[in-house]
Image (tube, rainbow, N blue to C red):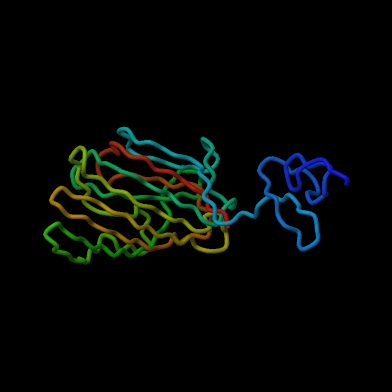
Amino acid sequence: IKIMSGIVGSYFNTRGSGLVAKLGTDGQHMLSAGPGKSNVFETAAGGGSWNLIKSLTASGDATLSFVNGTDDVVIDTTYNVYCFTFSFIHPQTLNASFQFNVSDDAGSNYDLEKTQHTYRAWNSEANSSGAPTDSTFKLANDTGVALLNQNVGNTAGDECCSGCFWLYNPGSTTFVKMYESQNLMYHSSDYIYAHVVTGYVNDTAAVDAVQFSFSSGNIDAGVISLYGITK
């Protein structure tokens, strides 16, 4: 009886049955190559992953800006989709509105034309609700800031807003840049507000900077993180 050394299929099987063709490298997975064939090590296919680019923490800042090529920020053709998440954003001033603006000259000017429409709804602990029409959200080729929500309270410890802001193909020089946002805002009068924003930057130049601010006062607290989304 011939006894073969090594454990079939083990990491250390350099002799044995030969079912393991070779040793893999760090991060690879052992995959079947089919019936009767040696297993192989391959790098797993990617897809749909979120790649953290930069996080900024507010502490009494007038603005929080993400500029391509500055402080490791990437906003170009590296990714087709970028997402900004914002958590517990708290204003200095009562009833300020959280807003954004974009630039095509690395933040020297935030003055690109934008068109958008927003759906705003609320629900209270008393179970009353509604969806008011607010013309301040309806931009039409406006070069000013674009609102993401409205009237955020500034009571310490509870009033704030959180959500996400998606920007599609900012590095394109062929098409306008579409965007959308979904965010929630808590008001101490026991209302939770939901805002859904859709719009586009009416410019074919590449967008390379995004800036967040409040309509009045500073951003007292909160974190905004930028992600690039891999296909």
The answer to which image quadrant residue 89 occupies is top left
Q: Position of residue 158 (x, y in %)?
A: 21, 42
Depth check, front residue: 143 or 59: 59
Q: Position of residue 21 (x, y in %)?
A: 81, 49
**Which residue is at 17% across, 64% downward?**
129
As drawn, 22 above or below 165: above
Depth check, front residue: 113 or 35: 35
Query: Quadrant location of the C terminus?
Result: bottom right
**Which residue is at 67% across, 49% downward?**
29
Depth check, front residue: 202 or 229: 229
Q: Is residue 188 left or right of residue 119?
A: left
Residue furthest top as drawn: 59
Depth check, front residue: 99 or 115: 99
Q: Is residue 119 left or right of residue 113?
A: left
**Which residue is at 54% across, 44% downward?**
74
Q: Is residue 144 left or right of residue 11?
A: left
**Which residue is at 35% across, 64% downward?**
140
